[in-house]
Image (cartoon, rainbow, N blue to C red):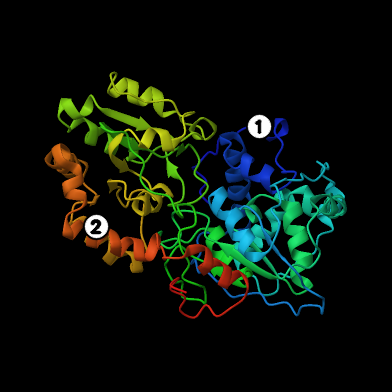
Amino acid sequence: MYPDIQLVYADGTKSRLVPFNTADFHALTKSTEWNSLVYADLWNTASAEHITSSDHTYSTARVHLKPRLSKLSGYVLSATYLPRMQELLLLLRLGTKYRRLRVINPPAIPVNDEARQQLIFNESQSSDVEKVLIKLVRGYLPTSFLEGFAALRMSIYRMGFPNSPKTIFTSNRHIFDDVFNAWAADAIENGSRLILGQHGGHYGISRFPSYAERHEISVSDTYLTWGWMPSTGSTRGIILTTIKSHRKKNKVPFKLLVVSEQLFALPRGVFIDVAQDSNYLEHLGLFVQSLPSGIQNNLEIRRHRGETSTGYKLEKWWQSQIPTIELGDTSIPFSKIVATAKMVVIANNGTTIPENFARGIPTLITWTTNWVEIRDEAKPIFAKLAEVGIFHEDPVSLAKHVSAIWDNVDAWWESKEVVEARELFCSQYARSVPHPRKFLREIIMGKSTIDLQGDL
């Protein structure tokens, strides 16, 4: 397709390409070596099929199975993203006992090439790109879904979950736990309802919905967002991670905390992972260098704990650019670090933004379209945030704003126009209600969700 381009990639004979299960797959996707082999495989397969480009469309059509008739009883809540005490209290309101989160990993079964070649797919209605992906599925499908599927199903009983609960509610476990998903699939076929909660930030804001957002909306009976409403039927839920949680700060907070993202040598998806060859670090570096020395001396960079696994360490870059900068200890919980912060600057479209807004922590946001694009529905909200000084695309403008409000951050944060902008954001991406446990109980029990406001 491009004869002048020479592709350089890792030696695949020394690497394990096929994941054992979904959790293993997620771990492999962060590996630079593994991604280089996937890129090469995709390139070579697409070149052989003469594929050049494709229009991207996203389908969120729901999958409805006719349930078997079965007696349903009880509720299963697992990895809901609720604070531990709130989850326990919700279980009490539902009359359901607490089950400790216990992940059962299916056996690691080796690849059977012959079995993979016998996989049959219906390609009659497939696009050219889909046909290429079908060819690749045989090489990357986790063994727990083929060679180890019988062993996976035999692991279900070890979870100790009921066969047919009325409702299953999770916000996280379906993403990594194959045994849980196999159990849930059986329960749903028996008539159980599946409620999935939003997993974190990025949802509802990014121009490009992640695979998780699209998949979760398509397979759940009820999908709980953190406030925004997708085009397809879902429920305007509430932010789950911060229920009954408020800002905790030291008596005299003094730090400017800058929350940075991990960079990927080989990004897994556009506008989901930040590429190391983007202008991300230069953007943050210019912001820091534009600050007065007095604020720089109180600044700490909060690095992503997963940065060491994605191919690029920020520590060396920061030390070469600003040797005196404080990089902090990533092993210290964020809740302890943020308690020392006078203000937080966030440079990614992640979970920290809605959580900080929900807790009332003074927060500024910065990014450019080089690494974040937002969907049309979010643009008026971010325009309002920019109007009051919360959102900045220009790092120098951001530095000037920080300098201007540094002596009295709380006065600015609590000003009428800023509070209105914060409330607008929270109404869509960090929604709260007066009685959150009662709100969730009504949804889990299957009562009307047409316009639940929480004041029940």
Q: Nearer the viewer, residue 117 or 211?
A: 211
Position in image of residue 110 (x %, y %): 83, 41
Tell me which amino acid carries mark 2.
Answer: Leu
Please tell me whether mark 1 sits on a helix, a strand or a loop: loop
Check disc 1 and report the residue beneath it: 11
Q: Residue at x 75, y 75 (%)?
A: 191
Position in image of residue 343 (x %, y %): 27, 40
Q: Is residue 215 visible?
A: no
Query: What whole-number distance in Å separates the C-alpha atoms at marks 2 and 1?
Result: 48 Å
The number of numbered badges drawn on the structure is 2
Most extreme residue toward the left is: 404
Whether pointer 2 and pointer 1 mark residues with C-beta atoms closer than 8 Å, the reply is no
Position in image of residue 390 (x %, y %): 23, 51
Q: Is residue 261 left or right of residue 172?
A: left
Q: In which quarter of the view is residue 248 placed?
A: top left
Please tell me whether mark 2 sits on a helix, a strand or a loop: helix
Q: Is residue 87 left or right of residue 339?
A: right
Of the numbered discs 2 and 1, the one sitting upstream in the chain is 1
Q: Is residue 315 left or right of residue 297?
A: right
Q: Is residue 369 visible?
A: yes
Q: Nearer the viewer, residue 448 or 125?
A: 448
Q: Is residue 136 left or right of residue 232?
A: right
Check disc 2 and report the residue beneath it: 385
Q: Is residue 335 above or below residue 372?
A: above
Q: In which quarter of the view is residue 31 placed?
A: top right
